[in-house]
Amino acid sequence: MKRTNSAIFTIAFLFLTVLPTFAQESELKVIDEVVAQVNDGVITLSRVKREMEVIIESMIAEGKTREQATAETKAKQGELIAGIINEEMLLQKGKELGIEADADASVNQRFVEIMRQQNLKSLDALYAEMEKQGLNPQTVRENWRRQIIKDLVMRRAVDSKVYWGWSSKEIKAYYEKHKDKFTKPETLTLSEIFLSFAGRDENAVRDKAKLLVKELRAGGDFAKIAMENSDRQDVKDTKGSVGTITVPELKRIDEKFVPVLAATKVGGISEPVETVEGIEIFRVDDRKDASKESVFDETEVRNAMTMEVIPNERKKYLGTLRDESYIKINDTYRPLVSPILSAEVKPEEKKPTK
């Protein structure tokens, strides 16, 4: 099931840090303190404070007081700085591997997709809408770019090597020992209508979803209603059809979907399901029950084996990057940061049970 970042206006603020400080010419200019040096790059105190403020604001949005959010964030300052050091190493590795161009292309594509979903004529129009919501397009772009670079480095340097590193003998042995993991899961064939929250009054979207469910349950033409109302870019081609998906796959997309669809009969219309991006309305076109029969699928087995060890392998990779890097931490922050980095250098040895 395709998922995009159509809810940019509701989630992007989590990644933003727009707290500039301007000094008058007549004022004394304070040189920013260097918290850590990572090869040729430096991590400044102002950067740490900006990232702390983002975390604090997100915690306040979740219902905590500023005092609570500030205290909890300060208590984890060492973890935050360690995370920024890891990020800096990954960004430098991404530049070394030539990944930046791929990241830029991915970010550009993401903006284009959102532009089309919002029925806007140009990227300039999208940027204008973002600015109306208090979002800086260039800040959003840079945050997405950094995240994509980090993800690509991990996928290429760690994930893909682990995935393709299993021998046929190991794969067969793992399958034989864990056949219960590879039974046929329940599958659902679905159609959907997606109503985006982006740039809209959320209560109005909720009211519209209720009216559409009522109309569909009264016998309305699903394909026609989907083409007239769904915010999916390709709805005119798909007419709302999603295709067949397993329940485990559906759960990975959003756990909220599973109980709602379990309560919906074949041919029935689900209750509206609210996500961060908007509201989903599903029609269950077909359902096939799970089976206890085990099925060998090399791709599935490789995935299962890889997922067991990826967290540990990524930690080991970060440890290797640290060994290869010049890292100098300011004496003030070393007691907070060094124990965390040291703990990450020697991750628990773990291999999938064969």
Image (cartoon, grey):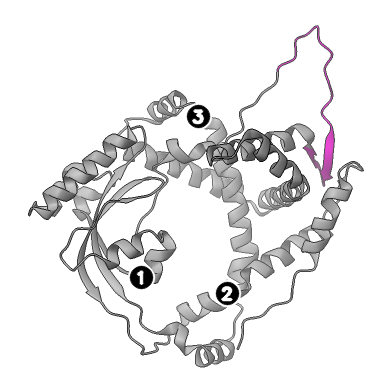
- Left or right: where does residue 218 sit relative to residue 43? left
What is the crowding at mark 3: few (fewer than 14 residues within 10 Å), some, or many (at least 20)? many
Secondary structure, mark 2, is: helix
Instruction: Identify the residue at the far right of this view.
Output: 331
Q: Which residue is mark 2?
A: 306
Q: Quadrant of residue 322?
A: bottom right
Number of marks present in the image shown = 3
Task: Specify the amino acid type for callout 3.
Answer: Leu
Residue 24, magenta (yes or no): yes
Taking the spot 59% from the left edge, 55% from the top edge, the residue there is 151
Instruction: Identify the residue at the far left of this view.
Output: 219
Circle 2 or circle 1, nearest the eye:
1
The answer to the question of whether label 2 and label 3 lie on touching residues, with beta carbons closer than 8 A, is: no
Residue 339, compared with residue 74, is above or below; it is below
Residue 311 is situated, as x and y percent measured from the top left of the image, at 64, 67
Residue 251, magenta (yes or no): no
Task: Give whichever of discs 2 and 1 has the lower sequence position.
Answer: 1
Quadrant of the drawing holding the N terminus: bottom left
Mark number, residue 135: 3
Q: Which residues are magenta?
A: 22-43
- Inter-mark Cα distance, 2 to 1: 21 Å
Task: Give whichever of discs 1 and 3 has the lower sequence position.
Answer: 3
Q: Which residue is mark 1?
A: 247
